[in-house]
Amino acid sequence: MKVGVLALQGAVDAHLRALGRCGADAVAVKTAEALDGVDALVLPGGESTTMSMLLDRFELRAPLAERLADGMAAFGTCAGMILLAAEVLDGRADQRSFGVLDVAVRRNAFGRQVDSFEADLAVAGLDGPFHGVFIRAPVVERVGRDVEVLASVGAAPVLCRQGRVLASAFHPELSGDDRLHELFCRLAER
Amino acid sequence: MSATPDPSVAGPETGTMLVKRGLAEMLAGGVIMDVVDPDQARIAEDAGAVAVMALERVPADIRRDGGVARMSDPEMIEGIKAAVTIPVMAKARIGHFVEAQILEALGVDYVDESEVLTPADEAHHIDKWAFTVPFVCGATNLGEALRRISEGAAMIRSKGEAGTGNIVEAVRHLRSILGDIRKLTQADSAEVFEWAKRLQAPLPLVQEVAATGKLPVPMFCAGGIATPADAGLVMQLGAEAVFVGSGIFKSDDPAARAKAIVEATTHFGDPTILAKVSRGLGDAMPGLEIGGLDTKLADRGW
């Protein structure tokens, strides 16, 4: 299975390595042609404003929206979660997202970089805690009916699933634990 | 509503090396732009910058004006923080740990312990482990990079020569750091001790680089980037992201040039796209020959 990582900007390499360890054929996606060739897509962490602009400037937004509407499996981490969400709070006014995950996400909800943190999370369906790395992380504030919350920090959902779309507010690619990438690869193979 | 980490969850911990390095990883493939006021910060964000560096004068002006260059006015940094949603970095003088404390208290996202400002200490850099905020430091060679990492830097940028619009020093420093990493990976276990001595760097870090073939933190490039082609050059040489100082706001058309450099940094390996984004940008900043400089900023730091 060929899994792409959207490579306009952000923590691309760590995702490629994690997917490779899960046995996927992982490739960086910077163009519409590259997007055509993948079965599933990871939208990595980085700056959601930058990625959103580059999606428009390199004419990737429409083809990606189409693939997502067709049911392509997608995994958004941090900025990627923001790009997949139905509603973005505290974003730029011109920031647009794909709306395939029916949640409202607040950007930088935990504060600035000095508030970034690591914490163990209880994840539904995983044995043992998952170590979450939260970098200027967003949180989910409203969850739609079809969205399953798999992990929370306090009352705030930080890992959600809707069908073949998975999204985390934290960075599973930084913690050296590939269980969520494995989960995503299984979702994508369905 | 602002969420807070739940103390009942095991180990919410701020200021760890992973969290510090993590933000640097998120900036990879992006452009960090020097800005001196909220208007410039907005132009940078609109162009697709992943972060801005708040400072009072861009390096070209610091070079022209002379005198002591210090940390920026907190009011100006706060104005820039309020103007954008992307991370805001700010510079402290080399060794000036109180400027760094102030920047941390202001809530900046990264502190640049920078040779562009006038050093405050001629022997010591800041003990960066003592801070929750992450630090980026400049380096001209592998030894300097590893010394900064041993002091707690979570990101390294090759120094180049700031404020010149001349890429030659950035290329020299990148080639020096990455070339030595390539050679170090060929060293046998006995030779690694000699490398540590020669680099004047801690042995465990030298051993780690020998084993992994890369620095333990992301390496970005700064100092002299003025065109999309410059960005493409340093990215192809192996930089993970670029800092652009004077190159944007000292050019004819900052907004267009900023956008073009962002696009070039994403598609650094595609000459067709580089050609497309390089068109019609007006004049780049006027450049300076390195041989004619009174002060080489890259020589600051030890």
Image (cartoon, coloured by chain):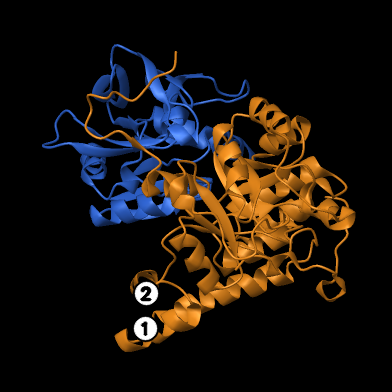
Chain colours: A blue, B orange
Residue B212 horizontal/vertical position (percent): 35, 69
Instruction: Check the image and report above or below for B161 versus A151.
Output: below
Q: Residues within 10 Å of mark 2 (few under 14, many from 20)?
A: some
Q: Chain of mark 1?
A: B
Residue A169 vs residue B125, the one in the foreground: B125
Q: Quadrant of residue A121?
A: top left
**CA gap, disc 2 to disc 1?**
7 Å
Q: Which quarter shows the C terminus of chain A? A: top left
Which disc number belongs to residue B203?
2
Task: Name the residue type under label 1.
Answer: Phe
Residue A155 vs residue B77, the one in the foreground: B77
Q: Chain of mark 2?
A: B
Element at label 1: helix
Q: Quadrant of residue B259?
A: top right
Would you say A67 lies left or right of B148 here?
left
**Residue in the image at 58% along x and 76% along y:** B176
Task: Name the residue type under label 2.
Answer: Leu
Q: On the image, numbered disc 1 is attached to which residue?
A: B193
Q: Is residue A123 visible?
A: yes
